Image (cartoon, grey):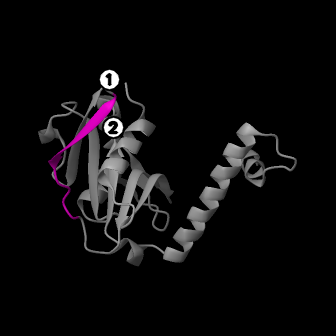
Amino acid sequence: MIKIEELVHAYIHSHCDFEKELVLTNYFQADWEADILIIDAEGCSHEIEIKLSKSDFKNDFKKSYINKETGEKFLKHDKISCGDYICNTFSFLLPMGMVDANLIPEHCGIIEFYHNVDTWETEFYPIRSAKKLHEDSYWSLNDKDLFIRKMALNLLQRKMEIKGKHEELIFKNPFDIKKTK
């Protein structure tokens, strides 16, 4: 079975234009996480959620969040379907035939993949385009400067994490210290 990291790599390198799009993987923002987040030059954003099992897919519809300002609890897909979501479009990336397309809400795009274990090639098939949830630019809903600072911090954290795994550091990694508190 293909690992999720390999699937992400195969998808973004065959379907994303790094010259024109900002492509993030496992991106966390406030109370949600995107397996793949693509933001084009105009600020149109597309979240792609990867599901490799039926149970994982079903659980996505049980995810609930609490509005930090009002305390209101809501289901993720209720928020997506009414357009009160950060991303302009939302899609599922699933193994071929895992879920009947009729069981997936109309607002969700569907991309299926087939991974050939013999040749190690992965092919992607758009089954249904994602519906536009709202017209707001990602940058009108998010502070671009804060976004860039968070990305720079994330890059530094990952660099220190990788460096610490491969060589002994002579100073305490400040990011490890924060994790233990």
Q: Residues in magenta?
A: 120-132
Q: Position of residue 140 (x, y in %)?
A: 39, 78
Q: Is residue 113 left or right of residue 165?
A: left
Q: Nearer the viewer, residue 5 or 140?
A: 5
Vertical placement of 141 versus 3: above or below?
below
Vertical placement of 110 versus 141: above or below?
above
Could you tell me which residue is drawn at 32 percent across and 23 percent down?
Answer: 117
Circle on res. 117: 1
Q: Is residue 32 left or right of residue 122?
A: right
Query: As shown in the figure, which amino acid type bears the numbered disc 1?
Result: Val
Query: As shown in the figure, which amino acid type bears the numbered disc 2?
Result: Lys
Could you tell me which residue is drawn at 21 percent across and 51 percent down?
Answer: 109
| Residue 86 visible (yes or no) | no
Circle on res. 51: 2
Q: Is residue 33 left or right of residue 135?
A: right
Circle on res. 99: none
Element assignment for label 2: loop
Vertical placement of 24 versus 69: above or below?
above
Could you tell me which residue is drawn at 86 percent across and 50 percent down?
Answer: 171
Residue 106 on the magenta span: no
Q: Position of residue 136 (x, y in %)?
A: 31, 75
Categorize mark 1 by other alpha carbons within 10 Å: few (<14), some (14-19), many (20+): few
Residue 126 on the magenta span: yes
Q: Position of residue 64 (x, y in %)?
A: 39, 49
Could you tell me which residue is drawn at 31 percent across and 43 percent down?
Answer: 61
